[in-house]
Amino acid sequence: MNRIVVAIFFLIMTVVACTTESEINPRPRAYPRVHYPERNLVSYSQQDCPFTFSYPDYFALHRDSTYFDKFIDNPCWFNLHADNFNADIHCTYTEFGSYTQFQQLVQDAFRLANEQNKRASYIEDFKIILPNGISGMAFSMEGPSASPFQFFLTDSVQHFFRGSLYFNARPQPDSLQPVTEYIREDLTGMIQSFQWK
């Protein structure tokens, strides 16, 4: 008799539990909390480098001494590292002497930007024309690409400067988007303040 009462009790509890309506609410879309530092501008001006520009002081300057396991003796190759965002802006400068070398540098910049096409869902390029004789291109990538922003600046005669933004993390465009937009504003300011000496 006790077994029948217990079985009926569990049957009634199961029926009651299954008939109550429960609301299913999806989690709201959220991003990880990021602390955005203040933008205090610092001027980059090295004696050995023929250019100057301004960048925010939350970036730390590190001289780049290797390139694919080769030693680089160029003081104008450096990284701007943002510890807050675990991001680097890789900056390179090349001096060229002929139109063929200039064309090769431009082709390399386009090739490196197009390599992001394997993962990027969209690439938009912008022509840069500054009043001080500087021109170039900027490439903005959307989607899970390794580099969300790249650019190059040149005087088309002798100087070629290239920069590319990389995050030292797996590309998650939905969570990196606010940080990418914040750094893109600083890169735009860096490009606008760029000058040849």
Image (spheres, grey):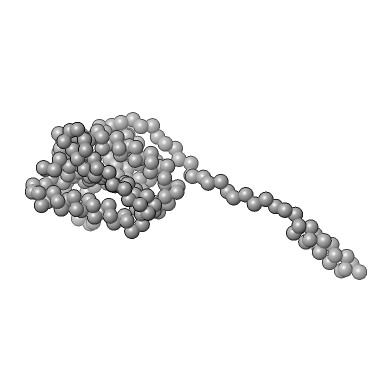
Q: Position of residue 40 (x, y in %)?
A: 33, 30
Residue 116 image offset from top left, x and y in percent: 31, 55
Q: How many marks?
A: 0
Note whether 186 is above or below 25 in the view shown. Answer: above
Q: Position of residue 193 (x, y in %)?
A: 24, 33
Residue at image point 20% right, 53% down: 108
Q: Residue at x 44, y 37 (%)?
A: 35
Q: Is residue 107 above or below residue 32?
A: below
| Left or right, residue 105 beside residue 32 | left
Q: Seen in the image, is 85 located left or right of residue 153?
A: right
Is 175 displayed left or right of 136 in the figure?
A: right
Q: Is residue 153 left or right of residue 2?
A: left
Residue at the spot x=51%, y=45% of the render? Answer: 30
Q: In the displayed orientation, state which residue is furthest to the left.
A: 98
Quarter of image, res 20 = bottom right
Residue found 39% across the figure and 52% down from its top: 143
Q: Which image quarter is the N terminus in?
A: bottom right
Figure quadrant of residue 61: top left
Q: Nearer the viewer, residue 115 or 81?
A: 115
Please say whether residue 24 is visible from this viewpoint.
Answer: yes
**Quadrant including the C terminus:** top left
Q: Single out the residue that lies furthest toward the top.
A: 40
Can residue 51 be seen by looking at this rendering? no
Image coords of residue 125 (percent x, y): 28, 47
